[in-house]
Structures are given as C-alpha cells and as structure tokens.
Amino acid sequence: MPQLIDTISDILALSGAAVERNQEHLEALLPAETARALQLPEHAVLAFEAQTNGVAGELVTYQSELVDRLFDWMQLRGLYAQIAVADLYLKQGVTAVAESRFTVRNGLLKAAAAAERRLQYACFHFKYTAISDEKKEGLARAVINEHTLAEVHEMMAQLSLAVTTEAESVVSLETQPLAKVYHAACRNVRPIISGDLADFHRSLQRRLQRDIARLHEYYQSLKDEIQNKIVRRQLAGKEREDEEARLRAVDLEYRRKVADQREKYAMKIEVEPINLLRINTPAMMVTAELRCRKLGREVSLVWNPLLKDFEPIPCESCGDGLYAMQLCEEKLHLLCRACAHCQDCKRAICHRCHPGKCPKCGALFHQI
C-alpha cells in the first residue's frame, strides 16, 4: 500500500512530526496535540503489512479506525491561512492611467494623488452541490479586496508566480468588517456557480422536455382514442358523460405526471464555505475626486500589480464591478447602468437611495 503510506507520511510531516519510513512501516515522533487527536502515542509505529519482521506497531489499512480519525482530523485543518506577497513592481504615473481607465457617464473623475499601500484580500473557497435526478459537486472561488469590496479572482492566476511567505499581514488601511467581505464573496460567487452548472442544467432541461414529450404523446393518444369512440359511436346521454369524465381524468393524470417530472428534474443547489486564505500584497492606491453638478466625493482606485491593471469599482447597489459608472444625483453613489434607472418608467432612480421599489411608479427592484 505505497500510496497509503506516502499519504499518511506526508500528513504527519505537515503536522510537525518527525517521520521515518522503514520498508512497510512508519516510525514517527508526533507533537502532543497531533498524538491526542489521532489517539496515538507520541512515539508511534504504524505498520502497513501484517508481516513486519517482528516490528510491533498499529496495523493500518484503508478500513482501519486510524484512517477514519485522520480524515476527521484533516477536516478541521486548512480552514484558514494567511500569506504575504513580497515586494512587487508598482507602476508609476498611475494617476493619468486612472483617468483614462474609468469613465463617469454623468460627471467627472479627477485623479489627485497616488501612494504605495499594503492591502488585504480574502480568498474564499466554496463547495457547491447541485441535487436533482443526478448530483454534481464542484468548487468555486471568490477573491475580495477587503478595503473596497471589489471582486478580483483573476489575481490568483498570477499569485503562484509571486514570492510569498506565511506571515502576519500588515495593512496600511482599515479593512471592511468580515461580514461585509463574506457577503460580497457570496454575491460574486453566484454567477460563477451558475456558469459552472450551465451544462448540467441544460442536460436536465433536455431530459425533462424529452420525458414531457413522451407523456404528452402517450396521454394524447388516450384522449384521441376516447374522442374517436364518442364520434364513431355517436354516444349521447350517460354514455357520453362517462367518456367525457374519462377525458377529464386522463387530462388530470397527465398534468400530475408532468408535475412529477418537473419536481424530479428541479435543481436544488447547496453552497458552503470550506476555507479562507488572506493575502497581503503591495498595491498603488489612487485618490480621485468625483463631481456631478455641484456635488463631489472622493474614492480610492486600486492598481493591482498582480493584475497589472486597476481593479473595478463595485456598484454600491448590486456590487457588480465597474469601469464605466453612473453617479447618483442625490448622494453620488457609484452605480451600474441597471441600478441607476427604473426599468419600467425609465427615470433616473438610484437603487441604493430607494431600495426595493421605484418611488415614482412603484415598480419593484430586483434584490441582490
């Protein structure tokens, strides 16, 4: 069982144990905490074959209780980690780039100053399970800037190329509360999961339509047979009433069968967070002034060296990332096009100032 030996050896080594492998058994000096969790002595000998040439140790197989304890113990590890990215090249002259990268449709953006900062990002991994006639599982990831709440999962592709250390994060700015960061991650991971499950959902819909078509063909043939009988025999009175009652019963049974099929192929999605990685990295932060009519406010724009680009600004109503934005004329909220107007009456209505429904026509707004 070389794979089992290698796996257990690696897990014990990661826990801080000193592990020595001798042919078909392991000898390990375990940290006290690990020994207690696995119910082993601190000096443990694990044998993987019944014949161990006189070596006394606990026999380990795929069905042994130790493997079950090891699995349960591993479920509680790796839930949280924190890394710091070493110094990266930070682009200079980003103020001019910011003014060309971002567009304000109904106002002006003026970049004022840029400064180097160390920022913190939260990388959440989620496990999703889609349950229907079949089951599909997968993982999805959302990476949130803990200062601006921007979603920047693309930076993870470059993180593996950067020099990182497991270290305490030192940030230059105050972060948002973790509850708000987690809410932003949940909001942004929804379309990712929907995209991952698109083919699975289409497959379910094809099978549903196929089964409904078969039901329709079968029950339509029964109805045609009854109707032909009524016409052919020119039924009247009670005989006709009986056949028409059969028609209604067939139609009722058809609708019930269709409802059963819809329930069978309905997709329920369960999502749970499985771990969190906090990333501390240098960045350039640009302070910019937004103006609309006589109102003004400051915003922070982040040039991310892993992206080699500015991060989008989250819409302050739905959270979508923006490079082109609309300003609320009441409080200068940053809005996407959909959250800046009422879709029914077409008036300029800020969905952040007026959550839920339009104050002009009463149309309900989609809640995120």
Image (cartoon, grey):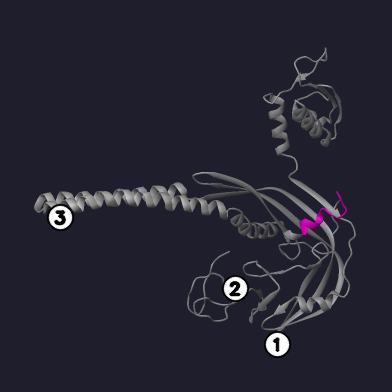
Above or below: residue 118 compared with residue 3: below
Is 107 magenta? The answer is: no
Q: Which residue is identified by label 2?
A: 339
Dot placed on the residue nearer the N-terminal end, 2 or 3: 3
Query: In the shown orientation, is residue 226 left or right of residue 255?
Result: left
Please report contact status of discs 2 and 3: CB closer than 8 Å, yes or no: no
Which image quadrant: the C terminus?
bottom right
In the image, residue 340 lies at what x, y percent?
A: 60, 76
- Tell me if residue 44 can be seen: no
**Mark 1: amino acid:** Lys
**Which quadrant would residue 351 be assigned to in this image?**
bottom right
Q: CA distance from mark 2 to mark 3?
A: 60 Å
Q: Quadrant of the N terminus?
A: top right
Residue where numbered disc 1 is placed: 294
In this rendering, the answer to whether 269 lies above or below 89 is above
Residue 297, given in percent of the width and then of the height, sits at 74, 79
Secondary structure at badge 1 equals loop
The residue carrying mark 3 is 231
Magenta segment, which residues?
A: 155-166
